[in-house]
Amino acid sequence: MFKNSMLIVAAIALAIVGFMGFMSSEKITIKGSDTIVILSQRWAERFMAANPDVSIQVTGGGSGTGISALINGTTDICNASRPMKKSEIQKLKERFGSMGIEIPCAKDGITVYLNPANKVSNLTMDQLKKIYTGAITNWKEVGGNDARIITYSRENNSGTYVFFKDNVLNGQDYSASCQNLPGTAAVVNAVSKDKNGIGYGGHGYSSGVKMSKVNGVEPTASTIASNKYPISRNLYMYVRNRPSGAMKKFIDWTLSAEGQKVVNEVGYFPVK
């Protein structure tokens, strides 16, 4: 009887210790860009494996969704594939008294996806603009077959959508016939199945499609790092205030040599 009682007490003690350990673990929430979500998930997995006392939850939804969550106070870190707008920074300042901190965490080149059967291998920035605004509608106008161009795009809450509109379309609206899809993977999938399709997105999602040159330049590590590739960009993490504790440790690790090695593994390029 006494022995059984001691076993019960010991079990309760262990349960309390385990519960206290769970309660003391630090949690980090990350939300935003679908371009970065796979990279961020890989970072989280590696970091948690080495730091079991830290729990990291990563979700996508687009840069706009992540920035809204940062402003609303429902995420610790926002992933964004575009810089925050002045209006968004102002909202953050009004709510938290902070203009936020921008942390470039990787380099990317927005890749133009073509179906492997498409004989077109190079497009100029002007041709891309005209294709996506509807001024060019047939592949024969850019050296391809006589077939209607089917354009695929990210949805309008995507940072990649905004960056492409600002830097390729020069602020003009997308054609009304452009098909907006929820996530880069969906764009790649559509183009891989449509011989007349064209899409765009992060370099890390280019499996199964052909990457077009832009202005005669291939999207490679060297051309993107040197900004020779015309649609090169930084990928960002945003936080409300100067990070501390586990969040600082995590961010510092992502920018370290080990963390930037993961960037290469996923298909993007080191920020340094």
Image (cartoon, helix red, strand yellow):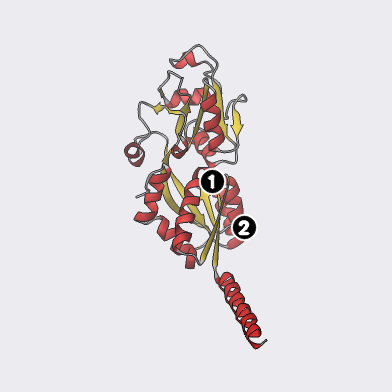
Percent position of residue 201, x then y: 49, 35
Q: Which mark is residue 33?
A: 1
Residue 21 appears in the rendering: yes
Left or right of 27? Residue 219 is left
Q: Does 172 appear above or below 134? A: below
SS state under label 2:
loop
Q: Residue at x 45, y 17 (%)?
A: 142
Q: Quadrant of residue 13?
A: bottom right
Q: Which mark is residue 44?
A: none
Q: Does 41 appear above or below 230? A: below
Q: Which mark is residue 74?
A: 2
Q: Badge 1, how many Cα within 10 Å: few under 14, some, many 20+?
A: many
Identity of the amino acid at label 2? Thr
Q: Seen from this angle, which residue lies furthest bottom?
A: 2
Q: Badge 2, how many Cα within 10 Å: few under 14, some, many 20+?
A: some
Q: Earlier in the sequence, mark 2 or mark 1?
A: 1
172 or 105: nearer the viewer? 105
27 or 89: nearer the viewer? 27
Q: Seen from this angle, which residue lies furthest right?
A: 1
Identity of the amino acid at label 1? Ser
Q: Residue at x 57, y 38 (%)?
A: 183
Percent position of residue 1, x then y: 67, 86
The span from disc 2 to disc 1 (Cα, nearest Å) is 15 Å
